[in-house]
Image (spheres, rainbow, N blue to C red):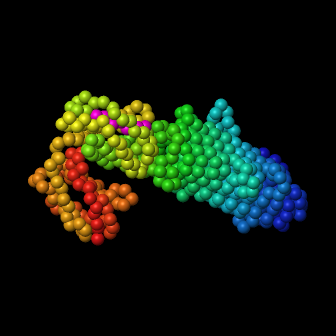
Amino acid sequence: MNILYAQHVETVNSGNWSSTNTWSTGSLPTQNDSIVIKHDVLFNVNFTVNNVINIESGVGLVYSGNNRKLTLSPGSRLHNNGNLKIQKVDNNAGTINNYGIFESSDELNNNPILAQGAVLEDAVINNYGDMIVKNPGNGASAKLNNNGGSIYNYNYLMVSDLNNNEPGFIYIDEDGMIETDRPVQNNGTIYNNGVFYSPSNFINNNGTITGNGGSFVLESNFIMNNNGIATCDGGPIDICGPDGTMPGGTGLNNIDPNCVSVCGVLQSALPVELLYFDVRLNDKQVELEWSTSTEINNDYFQILKSYDANNWEVIQTVKSQNPNSVEQLTYSTTDYDYNAGVSITYYRLKQVDFDGTDEYFEIKSVSQNLLKNIEVSVYPNPVVDVLFLRADKLSVDNIVVEIVNTMGQSVFKFIYDTLPSEGISTQNLAPGLYNLIVYSEGKKLLSEPLIKK
């Protein structure tokens, strides 16, 4: 810091920076002075700080004119406790401490002194107040370029364009939030213990995102390029959309599966959580249905068919509805090539990831003649609290009971080893008209209207 011939200068009146009447010395402050802003001042000049500027609480330093720039030299300091509104700030290895409101409508550059990629003298921004880097007027982009420096956000930071360039470091405290409204480029490190929100693409180019309990709320795509990684430091971080669904993009393969979750689901979990897989014979065709609660990097499903449960052939391929999902997804398809002359036909579901990894689920079967003489009835109908099933044979195994509303939505589905003698509770059903369907061993035994009182 060069403070040769420095003096203490403070404002005595509100007015223009360029007016001598504004300053206690009766002359304009120099770059080497220690400056205190105690009144509202219009910043109508470009100025370089070699020493320190203090803006007190309750007053403002607000730009006047066009292209006004404030430059911090190495070792200099800017302390804002009031309202600082400037067009452009270049922090060249200085320190900015913001406790009030800091607004830049054009560009905020955080420039350390680097040598062969290493930081010789850091440029530091500490935000304890509200820092806004955004053009409020014409919608043009305002940029925060962290060109290898350090940014510590303990409260609220709003940025149009955020570029965190290597070896830049951005820290978000557990009470802090960073919000952007344009694509984010990260080539450095973002350490998030709080909230990072972006409605646009989050692009991690050779960068690292990490943290301890933080969340990345992304409305658009999460993209990992080159050697970008997502990991944790002592606690989990979560990546999710604001509506609780997984963001799109190509980044979910490049995260630490043991501590980075996507919408609350750790990536070390199974790629597909299957709720059920049903097959049922309907006349001369077989209807197949399955449902998942979670899908991670899921490319497609395959339906396999066999007549001996040993030799299998793929008969259909079904693409994933959402390769990365934490919502229930239901699939259905039909085998129109059912051979009624074969006593038993076996079906199996296979799931394949984008990287070729696959998983097989349980085998189900259907039989043309197994249950053709069994009749099932239901009582009472209308029902109040408990529904009972009755078969004309003593034993019916693997019972699937499903209740569907008038919109075709399944509101109850359960698999029983045998007929439930204790009945089926309908207390959680709203009064109205439903359709009751009963299957066993892939065959539909009953389908009739059900009235709930």
**Residue at point 72% right, 67% down?**
58
Q: Please give the range of residues in magenta.
A: 299-305
Outermost residue, left direction? 394
Left or right of residue 168, residue 417 in this image: left
In the rendered image, residue 341 lying in the magenta stretch gets the answer no
In the rendered image, the quadrant that contains the N terminus is: top right
Left or right of residue 437, residue 343 in this image: left
- Write down the quadrant of residue 434 in the picture: bottom left
Question: Which percent across, then down, holds residue 204?
Answer: 56, 40
Check the image and report above or below for 141 versus 407: above
**Residue at point 28% right, 30% down?**
312
Outermost residue, top direction? 311
- Write down the quadrant of residue 380 in the picture: bottom left
In the rendered image, the quadrant that contains the C terminus is: bottom left
Question: Which percent across, then down, holds residue 426?
Answer: 26, 65
- Write down the quadrant of residue 34 in the picture: bottom right
**Residue at point 17% right, 54% down?**
375
| Secondary structure that dominates the magenta span | strand
